[in-house]
Image (spheres, helix red, strand yellow):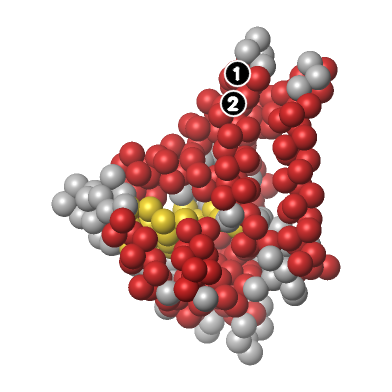
Amino acid sequence: MKTIINACLISISFLCQAQKIEVLIIGTVHHFEEEYKSLQNFEKVQRDIVSYDPDIICIEAIPTDDTLSLREILPRNMKRADSLKRELASGKYNSISTQRQLQGAHYFSRYDFWNAYFHWDSLGKSDQTPGPFSRYHRSLGNSEYGNIVFPAARRLGIEEFQNIDYRYGEMVFLENNNKVTKKLLLNLKFKPLGSYVKIQKRYKKANKAGSLIEFVNSREFQGSFSSLIDELPSILPKSTEAKSVKEAWHKRNKIMAERIYQAAISNKAERALLTVGAAHVSHIKHYLEQQGCSVITYGEVLEQQSKLN
């Protein structure tokens, strides 16, 4: 596996300042349907991550200092974190024996929710009970974190994740996206909608076949989604919403790419793994390469593996 990835990276090798940074991007889905979850080959993805042996793992979660995004997207979690911070300050948990409990609690009180969930999720894999902070826990059994990211990190011995998301303005983005869909229908622009429907059908078919991760990382999925976003302003030239959707999407992906780069620099990492919603892969790859990083997608890895088999 590592040989395959190295071969791909050599062909697109760049230097990031004086530090060479390689990034493997794995596209995921944020929610696996319970009915088909057991069919997906999560174990293979975990093995491929372990074989890649990244120095850091970047995830699609909002950093603690991105307060604009946090206040807009996770206001309830922030209130719960403030409540927990007051509990911790009371000193009544100083004698707790389970260190992972306290580690998770301290992460959560700093709005670093997914690092908190990792430590609490790790307790669930042992014989230890959830403990006094169980009301702050979140079930991750149907997410990419519970099925792919956290298990692979435990096997690698990685205990902290780099949060690189940016979601401020997402409410407006989703509102404009809905308006664009309606305008496509009203203006009889059936071709882009037809392409979207086709992809959704292929998505459902792959889900039932147990090849969902493989499909969302394929050229077919990646190409169709990125093209649809980029072509919206030309499809609806008079729509300010279409232009806004494209600009907001690119802004988010550009900022995420910059944060991945900075996380690698800060941690002196030569190899970074990014797990992200599959729709982001193509655009983040583009912006990472603009930063000078060597990038390979999981779809490219799977293609190389297929050629060898």
- Using the rendered image of the protein, determine whether residue 290 is visible from the camera's viewpoint: yes
How busy is the neighbourhood of tag 1: few (under 14 within 10 Å), some, or many (20 plus)? few
User: Taking 246 as reference, is 6 left or right?
Assistant: left
User: Considering the numbered disc 2 on the image, is that residue within a helix, a strand or a loop?
Assistant: helix
User: Taking 205 as reference, is 7 left or right?
Assistant: left
Task: Check disc 1 and give the amino acid type.
Answer: Ser
**Disc sitting over residue 234 in the figure:** 1
Question: Which is nearer the eye, 139 or 209?
Answer: 209
The N terminus appears in which quarter of the rendering? Answer: bottom left
Can you identify the residue that label 2 sits on?
231
Across and down, in percent, residue 201 comes to 79, 49
User: Considering the numbered disc 1 on the image, is that residue within a helix, a strand or a loop?
Assistant: helix
Name above or below for residue 93 compared with residue 241. Answer: below
Across and down, in percent, residue 44 comes to 57, 75
How busy is the neighbourhood of tag 2: few (under 14 within 10 Å), some, or many (20 plus)? some
Q: Residue at x 51, y 63 (%)?
A: 303
Extreme-left residue of the structure: 18
Across and down, in percent, residue 297 comes to 47, 56
Q: Residue at x 62, y 83 (%)?
A: 125
Name above or below for residue 36 compared with residue 309. Answer: above
Q: Residue at x 40, y 40 (%)?
A: 287
